[in-house]
Amino acid sequence: MKTKGALIWDFNQPWSIEEIEIGDPVKDEVKIQMEAAGMCHSDHHLVTGDIPMAGFPVLGGHEGAGIVTEVGPGVENVAPGDHVVLSFIPSCGECPTCQSGKRNLCDLGALLLTGTAVSDGTHRVTANGKPVIPMTLLGTFSPYMVVHKSSVVKIDPSIPFEVACLVGCGVTTGYGSAVRSADVRPGDDIAIAGIGGVGMGALQGALNAGARNIFAIDPVDWKRDQALKFGATHVYPDLASAMMGVAEVTHGKMADKTIITTGELKGEDIDNYLNMTAKGGTCVVTAVANMMETSVTLNLAMLTLMQKNLQGTIFGGGNPHYDIPQLLSMYKAGRLNLDDMVTRQYKLEQINEGYKDMLEGKNIRGVIRYTDADR
């Protein structure tokens, strides 16, 4: 079928709304009418080249929610009419990694940046007859998509789509960074660097896990104000002021857990994050760095002598097929504030405006909302 999508054709170029063609679902695939797509910072990393894809053009978008319209043979977990969220990492449940309990690290993830479908190794999306690489084999910046069943999670149909799409990446990643990867315990003091969609998810995870003090660090005044509304106890504009503030509040003990959710991770900052972390504590690295970045500033002696942990994490370290419905059930119960995380809704044609707002710190999360006019 012919539809439209937001493409990039080279690094550091604006998103371009163009006609694309999407193939029909084959065995184990699902066709979805998209209703909402979150504008995550990771898609901007495609523009800058921090996340290198296999080539161009690239169809953006990896955070989304919609309605199943068609299923291929072998699909039994969803049916036409079901409301679903897309998991930006496939989770098959059958590979050795999934079987070991690490479903966020499913072996199918090895294909994410190649652009070829899990089912048969071909391209599902084309533009002007040229193969298109969809972000993480999804491409939510289009009103329609065809994806593998392992990326599709059925949800409660009463959840608004603009809210549901957030748990396809940002909220699940941030929340899990706190409750799983950092293992926040009641009474812990937690520092969170970067208060966007992921950071706000981590903040709510720390709050629900019983954190005593939550130190939120962000250079944007408005975001610091939002952090306080969501439950942060202290806010700081930069690492230097946070270091002094955390030391004062904790009487020199520092933060039991530090979670890095900045828009881009810099290796030169790692030592400062570890210095803000208490002895025996854990620093969780959730933020994405340029894939060519290999230099890290770190006092190795203090890492050893203070017995600190430097922990990487992806998708919150959990199980997307379990965590996504659970987080949405918490939303329905009033235990997770997702409504206020949606700062503004945009049309697909406003995508460049939306990313400009993100880079200027105006949004916790911008969401593209599709309407009948997009069909």
Image (spheres, helix red, strand yellow):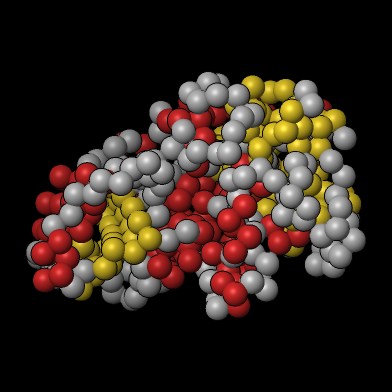
**Residue 370 left/right relative to 104:** right
Which of the two residues, 141 or 234, is positioned nearer the viewer here? 141
Q: Position of residue 293 (x, y in %)?
A: 33, 43
Residue at the (60%, 24%) spot, across then down:
9
Q: Where is residue 215 in the image (x, y as percent from the top left)?
A: 27, 55
Which of the two residues, 233 or 119, is positioned nearer the viewer here? 119
**Residue 264 left/right relative to 9:** left
Q: Is residue 24 above or below residue 282?
A: above
Query: Would residue 112 be seen by someone viewing this image from the given angle?
Result: yes
**Residue 202 left/right relative to 294:** right
Residue at the (11%, 71%) spot, across then down:
305
Q: In this view, does 255 lie above or below 46?
A: below
Quarter of the image containing the N terminus?
top right
Residue 130 is drawn in which quadrant?
top right
Which of the two residues, 136 or 123, is positioned nearer the viewer here? 123
Q: In this view, does 209 lie above or below 171?
A: below
Residue at the (55%, 24%) spot, across then down:
10
Quarter of the image containing the C terminus?
top right
Residue at the (29%, 37%) spot, across then down:
219
**Residue 118 left/right relative to 106:** right
